[in-house]
Image (spheres, helix red, strand yellow):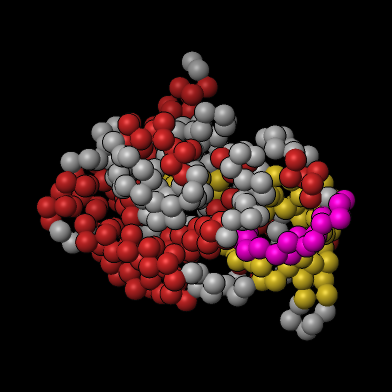
Amino acid sequence: MTRIAAAMLALAALVWDPAHAQDPRTERAPAAASARPSDSQSAPLFESHELLTLTIDAPLKTILDDRSQESVERPGGLSYEDSEGNSVRIPVEIRTRGTTRLESSICNFPPLRVNFSHAEAEGTLFANQDKLKLVTHCQDRRSEHEQYVLQEYLVYRMYALLTDLSYRVRLARITYIDTERDRAPLSKYAFFIESDDGMAARNGWEVIHTRVVPPDALDPVQLSLLEVFQYMIGNPDWSAFSKEPDRLDCCHNTKPIGHPAGPVFSVPYDFDLSGVIGTRYANYVFEDHFDRLGIRSVRERRYQGRCDSRPRLDGSFQMLNRNREAMYALYRDQEDLEHDTLEQSLDYLDDFFEVITDPDEMQREFHRKCRQF
């Protein structure tokens, strides 16, 4: 028996008991999690949405030139001013990360991973953090790339309004200082993403490491919300069931959490190819998949939900309708989001809400285009 077949059989044993399906916002009792104790402790970094002002000093040229999946961590420092006006500097290790944005033809400043020592971070804003993803601005000289950072940050914030089974994020204005070459400091927006273990432990679960997740193993209510949300933002680049070709663990831009004996929940991340953002490089990256999805650009939505999710669509629509104004307020209140970006984003979301309030459009988009598994 292959490893994939064994994984499918193991998780297929979790055929869902509908009695266990709960509203994604419902608080759950903690399960026996395998996460380290520090992951379930207080995380002051993500307990506020106030903009951070930080400085990162490191050998940036060496770091940014290393674009391999096994890139080497390099020593640097992260500095900020605390609430009492004291300067705090934390030694960190930094490396590049990612897939699409790791390519030099797309980003001259790729996403980073910042590794904190628990001992060095103790008593600071970054207490109880370990390895954190940092979403960066991608291109130094194109102003729209900072708009992309703000837009992707807001997508994470929107999903977190709907369910606690989501990644928390913290926006920062970071000044980068290259310690190995004479270059003017560079100040750009970026945001930190909560760690996988931290997100899972906060919800009382653990990250599930498997190569595939059978559809029937996933919580059907939470899965429906995920499917509809991905349609709302026009994200074609995800799977809750299978892994990326070059990765060992499931899944593609979603993280399965829960308990090996069930339940299992799929938590999304990485939204830069979404139509609501419309990055300059999205169509170039995803064009080979357009025929498969029946779309011509990432701005064109295509529902990728299961046909088995149809009985739960109304509940997902209602949740999104209840939170519509709160989601729009995130955009309207976001400092430095340009007016054109704001209007384009809200117009794109308006189109979604028109679809889910029109019976004919709803039938065409969700019931006729759902996927059989």
Quadrant including the C terminus? top left
Seen from this angle, which residue lies furthest front? 141
Seen from this angle, which residue lies furthest top? 1
Give me the residue at 74% from left, 45% from top.
64
Q: Position of residue 205 (x, y in %)?
A: 53, 52
Res 193 visible: no
Give me the residue at 46% from left, 60% from top.
155
**In the figure, is residue 313 to the left or right of 116?**
left
Query: Magenta span: helix, strand or loop, mainly?
Result: strand
Give me the residue at 73% from left, 68% from top.
54
368 or 312, nearer to the observer: 368
Give me the residue at 33% from left, 31% from top.
292
Q: Position of residue 297 (x, y in %)?
A: 36, 43
276 or 28, nearer to the observer: 276
Res 286 visible: yes
Q: Position of residue 127 (x, y in %)?
A: 73, 65
Asked which quadrant contains residue 233, the reply is bottom left
Magenta residue span: 175-194
